Image (cartoon, grey):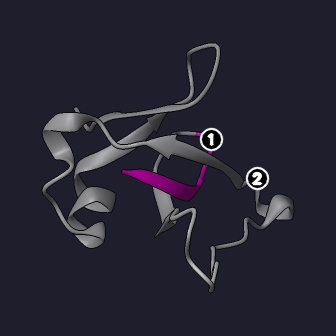
Amino acid sequence: MKLHVVFNNEGEILGAAEVKSGARIRARPIPDKHAGQLATDVYVPAEHQHYDLAALCQRLKVDVGGAFPMLKAKD
């Protein structure tokens, strides 16, 4: 599963939408760049793919310390 996420500089997910290649409607959250928010597409780790979107946003965060953003479990 792939998500489009909006997050802050600490990696907290502020908004998310599932990315589906065949979807006719592609509604996605938009970052507020003036507030320091960023957006990217990331893959959900296999061990978390059974959760719904709300649970994923609560359980995961964006790892902003690597070469490219990726999702990881909150500490």
In this rendering, position of residue 51 left or right of residue 71: left
Please give the label number shown on residue 36. Answer: 2
Q: Is residue 14 magenta?
A: no
Q: Quadrant of residue 50?
A: bottom left
The correct choice, above or below, for 40 with respect to 4 in the image is above
In this orientation, which residue lies closer to the viewer: 20 or 38? 20
Q: Quadrant of residue 68?
A: top right
Q: Main secondary structure of the magenta part?
A: strand
Secondary structure beneath disc 1?
loop
* Residue appearing at x 71%, y 55% in the figure: 37
* Residue appearing at x 56%, y 28% in the figure: 64
Quadrant where the C terminus sits is top left
* Residue appearing at x 63%, y 73% in the figure: 29
The correct choice, above or below, for 39 with respect to 21 in the image is above
For mark 1, what is the residue? Answer: 9
In this orientation, which residue lies closer to the viewer: 27 or 69? 27
Is disc 1 in contact with disc 2, using a CB cutoff of under 8 Å?
yes
Spatial distance from mark 1 to mark 2, Cα to Cα?
Answer: 7 Å
Q: Amino acid at mark 1?
A: Asn
Report the magenta residues as a range. Answer: 1-9
Secondary structure beneath disc 2?
loop
The correct choice, above or below, for 36 with respect to 54 in the image is above
Task: Give how far across and how far down residue 69 sits, in percent.
Answer: 57, 30
Task: Give how far across and how far down residue 43 sits, in percent.
Answer: 43, 40
* Residue appearing at x 63%, y 81% in the figure: 27
Task: Give how far across and how far down residue 57 sits, in percent.
Answer: 33, 60
Question: In terms of sequence position, does the residue under pointer 1 or pointer 2 come before the other?
Answer: 1
Q: Crowdedness of circle 2 by 10 Å Cα count: few (<14), some, many (20+)?
A: few
